[in-house]
Amino acid sequence: MQAAVISAEWAPRPDYPLSEEERRTRTARVGSSVWKHPQVAVQELPDPVCGPEDAVVRVAAAGLCGSDLHFFETDADGYMHYPGLARFPSVPGHEVAGEVAAVGERVKHLRRGDLVCLDDMVCCGACEACRRGFPNQCENLEDVGFTMNGGCAELLRVPARNLWSINSLRARYGGKEQVLEAGAVIEPFTVAYNALFECAGRIKPGAFAAVYGAGAIGLAAVQLLRASGAAQIAVFEHHAQRRELALRFGAHHAFPANGEGANGAQPARAVLRELTGGAGADVQVEAAGAFRHTMPEMEAAAAMGGQIIIIGRDRNPAAVQLEHLQVKKANIIAAMGNTGHGTYPNVIRMIAAGLLDPTPMITHRFALRDFAGALAQAQTRQGGKVLVKIG
Ligand SMILES: [Zn+2]
Ligand SMILES: [Zn+2]
């Protein structure tokens, strides 16, 4: 099969405490401290073999996201930016949809020909976190497209339990190709859903919401908030094209992100105070990964009982004036992951019912053989989702 393959050089930083486990498995827990000089090439790999509990998917489309770009972007010493679990050579692609080509003998919930999307988090089911019902905190996580070969390939083998049928979307979208394109952008919705309704919860119809960052996760959060009855949604985003998309996705207002009020623009806290008549925002979603800029705004703009939901990733610390939150009985909620708790089937049902539509998020399409072109487009970080179309 044809696949986009990332290779990199194993070169643990001298000050990085490499564990025996990392050395043995060649899987870095902190990719950016171990892997250098990443490269990608589309090449021929052997077809995957389906194990008894696996399924093999003929991939139709794979979305690129910020984490994929972090594999290729490097610091001054040549180390990749990606800070999570990583092993190379490997095939990227964790936002994937396709058609089931083969199922293992013990698989009961799928058949050949089913249209499916991928839940990329392969949890062990056996660690303390998994057994306590926290699969997103699995201590032995394998992640498709990160530690296992992903979907930027003609064929993808994964545990069948990580595939969800999207046959129900046929009635909504008609054509198979449209169903599979929608399927390839379900993953960002599951990330936002997990944050809003599993980690946070108590989001009420009529809420005033603010979303910082209108990348895929921010856009997904906007639609989910809209579907859950938010009365007003304000988005703060740097790029004009993404602000346009946010409005298309149901935001009522879209403002330039400015943090400290640069360029004469008002800081978010002032905008939100004005829009809410001083009451503040009930729900604020950090999907920008820029905590130093967003935290002071969110804290100042929180309504009484407000929730500040952190989805973006940022290794830099941010100062928090906790007393502001105490006075307002406001909460900061930290969210990560997208698996378990019925998240995938619920998102798929919402799409089937017309409550969500991920397809306007897709702004660019590239063939697998032009993976480099897809990457270059995604690196501009200006449009919506870039899809790699396969087959
Ligand atoms: Zn992603
Ligand atoms: Zn586990």
Image (spheres, rainbow, N blue to C red):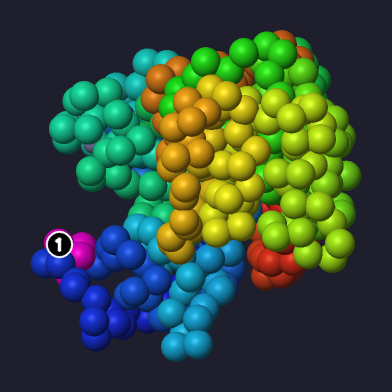
How many other residues sit within 10 Å of disc 1, few (<14), some (14-19) or many (≥20)? Answer: few
- Disc 1, SS: helix
For this view, does 284 lie left or right of residue 314?
right
For this view, does 373 lie left or right of residue 138?
right
Q: State whether residue 298 appears in this view.
A: yes
Residue 65 percent across, percent down from the top left: 61, 53
Name the one closer to the observer, 337 or 101.
337
Seen in the picture, residue 367 relative to 171 is either above or below; the reply is below
Residue 23 on the magenta span: yes
Name the one closer to the observer, 83 or 148.
83
Q: Can you identify the residue that label 1 sits on?
A: 21
Residue visible at 29% across and 44% down in the picture: 141
Q: What is the span of residues highlighted in magenta in the rendered image?
A: 21-25
Dominant secondary structure, magenta: helix
Seen in the picture, residue 36 relative to 244 is either above or below; the reply is below
Does any atom of ligand 2 lie closer than 8 Å to the CB of label 1?
no
Q: Residue furthest left?
A: 20
Residue 302 percent across, percent down from the top left: 60, 34
Q: State whether residue 246 appears in this view.
A: no
For this view, does 354 lie left or right of residue 188?
right
Residue 340 on the magenta span: no
Residue 342 percent across, percent down from the top left: 45, 18
Residue 39 percent across, percent down from the top left: 52, 77
Residue visible at 29% across and 82% down in the picture: 13
